[in-house]
Image (tube, helix red, strand yellow):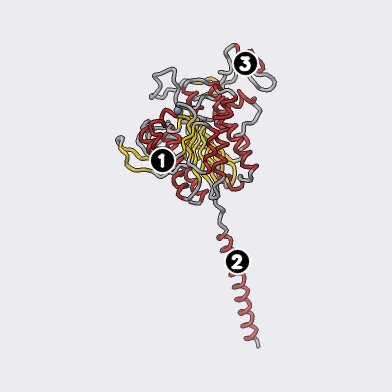
């Protein structure tokens, strides 16, 4: 009897153990089966030259020191190290390559590794990978469309100035839509490009994207600076309006999309030391981000879209220098620089550009240069909450690839 009771005890103990063990195993198995839903769409915004002080200066100058840019509402931030393979100070080609392919390369090179000016290896870009996975892939820029940043997403050349080769790479690329300036650069390849793309020079015709791949060029070279466009022109070809049209084209693709949107001319204005223009370009870029977020929310797309906003590098080493003594004489109650101070020449150039000593450009006191400071990565949308820390710029490629589950 006692033996029987002992046997029963052992039997039930084993049964209870097995029950809990198996149900726990089942639970952990079902937990591990809970895959993270891949992101359907990714939008990568690049503010060319938009170092942290450019963001601060634009906020102070245009909105007031205590106001918020659209970027300031992004909840998830990281710092990005921008150096290139051969320099602590990157150019746009190497930086765009890092973000587009996940590889550091030498300054001037586009999505290739280079030794002694020879291409050693071509790096596949996130745009090319996304196209293979049947995503809609598009690029919008305020520079000419064969310029370094957009070109890094579809071209593979040892030097960014090889516009002929870059145009041919565009012809061979899977790009569905590319918008910006550069009739001058595209014209020699017009006939060839028209075999595959609809070439449009009137922004109204971007809506032909439903049935055509689009190359849209809306100025001879780069698009005009934001503060040089009248309202009528802005309605047609401002970064915000071109991006709005690109979003509509992309959002129609049921498999999703990858878009890169570049505010290219923040950098150009900073090179020219046109500070006021640079800050206006930054604001136009920020408004483009704002319009995009409103569009995504309104169309219920933010839940499966990852939005990343960053800079390829800082330009100009801008410093937001405050007045040493009495700040009330500089700012009005809203935090704007007083008109009287502007007349004195103390603003809007008030955020003072410090001379950089980059040996590449240091001999030319008129030109200013890129710097090697870290830039900010802003993230919103699906999966963005994991984006925190200090990253290499190459990790932006990894973040997008992982988000898409490629
Ligand atoms: Zn530059």
> Which residue position is annotated with label 2?
24
| Among the two numbered marks 2 and 1 on one chain, the one whose residue lies closer to the N terminus | 2
Query: Seen from this angle, which residue lies furthest top?
Result: 344
Answer with the quarter of the image where residue 10 lies: bottom right
For the residue pair 403 and 240, the one nearer the viewer reads as 240
Q: Residue 195, which numbered label?
A: 1
Query: Seen from this angle, which residue lies furthest bottom?
Result: 1
The reply, left or right, for residue 48 in relation to residue 57 is left
Q: Nearer the viewer, mark 1 or mark 3?
A: 1
Q: CA distance from mark 1 to mark 3?
A: 64 Å
Q: Nearer the viewer, mark 3 or mark 2?
A: 2
- Residue drawn 62% across the image and 16% down it: 325
Q: Secondary structure at mark 2?
A: helix
| Among the two numbered marks 3 and 2 on one chain, the one whose residue lies closer to the N terminus | 2
For the residue pair 120 and 127, the one nearer the viewer reads as 127
> Which residue position is annotated with label 3?
325
Query: In which quadrant will I find the N terminus?
Result: bottom right
Q: Secondary structure at mark 1?
A: loop
Q: CA distance from mark 3 to mark 2?
A: 68 Å
The reply, left or right, for residue 314 in relation to residue 340 is left
- Residue drawn 61% across the image and 39% down it: 293
Task: Residue 291 in the image: state x and y as whole percent.
Answer: 61, 35
């Amino acid at each position: 009897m006692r033996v029987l009771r002992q046997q029963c005890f052992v039997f039930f103990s084993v049964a209870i153990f097995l029950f809990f063990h198996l149900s726990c195993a089942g639970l952990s198995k079902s937990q591990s089966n809970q895959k993270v839903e891949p992101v359907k769409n990714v939008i990568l915004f690049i503010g060319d030259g938009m170092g942290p002080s450019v963001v601060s200066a634009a906020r102070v100058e245009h909105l007031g020191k205590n106001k918020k840019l659209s970027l300031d509402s992004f909840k998830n931030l990281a710092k990005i190290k921008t150096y290139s393979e051969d320099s602590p100070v990157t150019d746009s080609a190497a930086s765009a390559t890092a973000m587009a392919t996940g590889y550091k390369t030498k300054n001037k090179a586009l999505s290739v590794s280079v030794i002694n000016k020879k291409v050693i290896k071509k790096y596949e870009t996130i745009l090319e990978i996304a196209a293979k996975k049947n995503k809609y892939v598009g690029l919008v820029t305020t520079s000419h469309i064969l310029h370094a940043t957009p070109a890094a997403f579809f071209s593979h050349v040892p030097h960014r100035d090889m516009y002929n080769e870059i145009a041919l790479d565009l012809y061979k690329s899977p790009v569905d839509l590319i918008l910006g300036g550069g009739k001058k650069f595209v014209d020699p390849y017009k006939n060839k490009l028209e075999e595959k793309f609809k070439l449009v020079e009137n922004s109204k015709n971007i809506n032909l994207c439903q049935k055509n791949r689009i190359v849209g060029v809306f100025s001879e070279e780069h698009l005009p600076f934001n503060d040089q466009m009248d309202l009528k022109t802005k309605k047609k070809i401002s970064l915000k309006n071109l991006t709005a049209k690109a979003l509509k084209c992309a959002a129609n693709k049921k498999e999703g999309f990858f878009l890169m949107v570049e505010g290219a001319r923040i950098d150009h204005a900073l090179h020219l030391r046109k500070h006021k223009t640079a800050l206006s370009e930054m604001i136009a870029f920020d408004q483009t981000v704002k319009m995009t977020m409103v569009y995504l929310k309104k169309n219920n797309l933010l839940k499966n879209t990852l939005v990343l906003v960053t800079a390829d590098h800082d330009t100009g080493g801008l410093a937001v220098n405050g007045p040493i003594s009495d700040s009330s004489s500089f700012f009005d109650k809203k935090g704007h620089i007083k008109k009287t101070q502007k007349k004195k020449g103390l603003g809007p150039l008030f955020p003072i550009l410090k001379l950089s000593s980059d040996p590449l450009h240091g001999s030319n006191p008129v030109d200013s240069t890129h710097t090697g400071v870290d830039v900010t990565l802003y993230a919103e949308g699906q999966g963005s909450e994991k984006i925190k820390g200090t990253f290499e710029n190459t990790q932006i490629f990894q973040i997008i690839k992982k988000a898409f589950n490629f």
